[in-house]
Amino acid sequence: MKDELFLRGEKVPMTKEAVRALALSKLELHWASHLIDIGAGTGSVSIEAALQNPTLAVTAIERNPAALRLLEENCQRFACGNISVMAGEAPDVRVEQADAIFIGGSGGHLCALIDWSLQHLRPGGRLVMTFILQENLHAALDHLRQSGVTALDCQQLNIAALTPLGSGHYFKPHNPVFVIACQKEDAHVHTL
């Protein structure tokens, strides 16, 4: 889906189209029944997942009041009846276990969110995270290793978009984005 289709707010983050496409692919939602989107922002990941998978139940968690308003408006705009918007902050919210979890924003609680995600994923479930800060990337990789997650996929995306400049065009670079994807194995089962 094109980014321009979503209602946007000045201070409300959104996972951009190319990153969203990769993240959704890594979540492997074709077999999932429940997705949790942590730090849902405008709802771009939740909405595209819900539209691509009409039987998928999506729980979109967001703490920012401005983002919650945009999230609700975007859900209505796309008529996504399979998205439940939850006002709150993971890891303090209570939700059902899921087959896939996406972390688009950590709010400074990255390690706690990884632990919470591993607790709320069913065995075989997919965890996908995106970052622009190298410190968050390294913290996530270290914490996943300490949690016993050994099989993971990590990619860096460098996207540039064709942009007019005077009488010509150039490729305007976007911030590089890191994408981590892993699967919960039986050895990662934590008690709630």
Image (tube, rainbow, N blue to C red):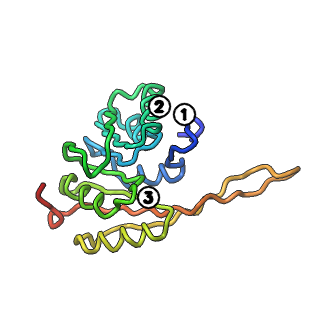
Along the line of sight, the residue nearer the viewer: 148 or 64: 64
Residue at 28% in and 60% down: 112
* Alpha carbon separation for disc pair 3 and 2: 21 Å
Along the line of sight, the residue nearer the viewer: 115 or 100: 115
- Secondary structure under tag 3 reads strand
Q: Which residue is mark 3?
A: 130
| Disc on the earlier residue, 1 or 2 | 1
Q: Residues within 10 Å of mark 3 (few under 14, many from 20)?
A: many
Q: Outermost residue, right direction?
A: 167
Q: Is residue 74 above or below residue 190?
A: above
The quarter of the picture where residue 182 lies is bottom left
How many marks the image carries: the answer is: 3
Looking at numbered disc 2 in the image, what kind of residue is underneath it? Answer: Asn
- Secondary structure under tag 2 reads helix
Relative horizontal placement of residue 123, taking residue 83 as reference (left or right): left
Looking at numbered disc 3 in the image, what kind of residue is underneath it? Answer: Thr
Q: Is residue 78 above or below residue 122?
A: above
- Whether label 1 touches label 2, CB < 8 Å: yes
Q: Which mark is residue 74?
A: 2
* Alpha carbon separation for disc pair 1 and 2: 6 Å
| Disc on the earlier residue, 1 or 3 | 1
Q: Which residue is mark 1?
A: 7
Q: Is residue 42 above or below residue 167?
A: above
